Image: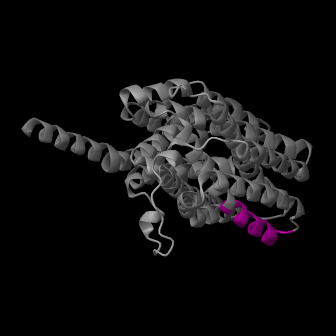
């Protein structure tokens, strides 16, 4: 058996399952603001709230995903969560008002949180240990592809086919994600290796829900997600305000191309030279892209900003996720993944509502300038909570080795 093999059949299936899962998410995330404002006659703040409700459910349930996988097994949780995600994807077709939409969004968000955490954990366990950076980078590439194609398809299909067609497409994607995830037969390495004994009568402790070693980098992810939420939630509305809405879908194409092209290099650099070489330049590039977007009064600036943002954000996300995963012991990597996405979701949800309120008062240009400032500040958080701490630990290890 070749333990060095990355592209096994199970790894490919779980990657594709994740792709269709996130495809449904990003199609809805981008087109839903248009659905709320145009289809239901809601406000920008209500559009942001529809995303925030989704994320609130994610934040509430994601901490339990790792505990559920430990107690009942990864495979069972993957199958159940993907099935529930499918059922609530179908439920959008029966929505008849804003209140019902919020209810469906809440339950959909909870199942999305558990499904993404369980599929991530399964994929991470399948990846060979010394190829984690490369493997996670490729796995997140499928998520990034969904991030690109989903918004493009969502905006296109709502323009030409209507909202019902968009909801039906998301349901079909959820079905494909379920079939692929359920057919992944292999248990991950983490699931095979170290299964801690669960005492059924013991009280639930916060350490059973959160991996504290992943918290420092997850806080950096929180800040980045806060700013990024303004892009996904309000990009289509902003483009319409600037009278260049016909180019909004192409913005995501440029965004996606610059995520995909450098991704193989990002993964290899992570494994060979470390994360700092990637993180700081990526933060700068991401912030510059947001500043360009804030001044996007022409199609050219809009598309260039999409490419720049894609390059910066596309390198940051796999770096942060890899750091979170490798910070934890092998048997707690599911919790590390859940912890990272818990704070990422929290930043996304708070950002959607806060930035929506800000945009209603001051406009989208001001909102995107603020997003650029927030992204720049994430470098301070990263340095303080991760880089500086890691350097200090390395110094202590060197001193201990020298004295021995």
Residue 47 visible in the shown view: no
The magenta stretch spans which residues?
97-110
**Residue 122 lies in what quarter of the image?**
top right
Towards the viewer: 44 or 249: 249
- Classify 384 as above or below 395: below
Where the C terminus falls, by quadrant?
top left
Residue 330 visible in the shown view: yes
Q: Residue, x 84% and y 63% (percent of image)?
A: 40
Total label count?
0
Q: Is residue 108 magenta?
A: yes
Instruction: Estimate the x, y position of residue 29 in percent, counting from the top left.
Output: 71, 51
Q: Residue, x 50% and y 26% (percent of image)?
A: 4
Instruction: Estimate the x, y position of residue 133 in percent, counting from the top left.
Output: 47, 33
Q: Is residue 161 magenta?
A: no
Instruction: Estimate the x, y position of residue 147 in percent, counting from the top left.
Output: 67, 40
Instruction: Estimate the x, y position of residue 99 in percent, counting from the top left.
Output: 79, 72
Direction from residue 47 to residue 209 in the image, left or right: left
Q: Residue furthest left?
A: 403
- Classify 209 as above or below 121: below
Towards the viewer: 371 or 253: 253
Where the N terminus falls, by quadrant?
top right
Dominant SS type (magenta): helix
Q: Residue, x 76% and y 48% (percent of image)?
A: 178
Direction from residue 55 to residue 274 in the image, left or right: left
Q: Residue, x 80% and y 39% (percent of image)?
A: 153
């Amino acid at each position: 058996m070749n333990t060095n093999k990355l592209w096994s059949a199970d790894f490919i299936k779980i990657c594709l399952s994740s792709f269709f899962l996130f495809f449904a998410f990003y199609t809805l995330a981008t087109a839903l603001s248009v659905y709320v404002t145009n289809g239901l006659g809601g406000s920008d703040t209500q559009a942001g709230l529809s995303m925030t409700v989704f994320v609130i459910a994610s934040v509430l349930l994601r901490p339990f995903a790792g505990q559920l996988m430990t107690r009942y097994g990864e495979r069972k949780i993957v199958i159940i969560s993907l099935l529930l995600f499918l059922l609530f994807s179908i439920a959008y077709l029966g929505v008849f008002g804003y209140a019902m939409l919020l209810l469906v969004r809440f339950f959909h968000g909870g199942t999305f949180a558990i499904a993404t955490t369980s599929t991530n954990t399964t994929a991470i366990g399948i990846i060979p240990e010394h190829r984690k950076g490369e493997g996670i980078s490729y796995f997140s590439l499928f998520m990034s592809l969904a991030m690109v194609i989903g918004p493009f398809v969502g905006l296109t299909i709502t323009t030409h086919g209507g909202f019902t067609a968009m909801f039906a497409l998301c349901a079909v994607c959820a079905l494909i994600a379920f079939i692929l995830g359920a057919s992944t037969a292999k248990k991950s390495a983490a699931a095979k290796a170290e299964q801690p004994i669960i005492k059924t009568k013991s009280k639930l402790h916060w350490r059973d829900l959160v991996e504290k070693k992943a918290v420092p980098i997850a806080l950096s992810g929180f800040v980045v997600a806060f700013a990024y939420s303004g892009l996904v939630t309000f990009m289509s509305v902003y483009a319409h305000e600037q009278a260049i809405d016909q180019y909004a879908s192409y913005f995501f194409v440029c965004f996606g191309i610059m995520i995909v092209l450098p991704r193989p290099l990002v993964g290899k650099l992570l494994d060979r030279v470390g994360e700092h070489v990637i993180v700081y330049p990526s933060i700068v590039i991401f912030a510059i892209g947001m500043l360009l977007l804030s001044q996007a009064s022409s199609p050219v600036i809009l598309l260039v900003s999409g490419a720049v943002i894609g390059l910066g954000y596309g390198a940051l996300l796999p770096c942060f996720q890899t750091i979170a995963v490798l910070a934890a012991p092998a048997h707690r990597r599911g919790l590390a993944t859940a912890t990272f996405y818990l704070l990422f979701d929290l930043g996304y949800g708070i950002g959607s509502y806060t930035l929506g309120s800000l945009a209603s008062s001051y406009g989208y240009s001001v909102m995107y300038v603020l997003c650029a400032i927030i992204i720049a500040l994430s470098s301070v958080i990263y340095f303080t909570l991760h880089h500086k701490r890691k350097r200090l630990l390395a110094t202590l290890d060197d001193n201990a080795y020298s004295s021995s």
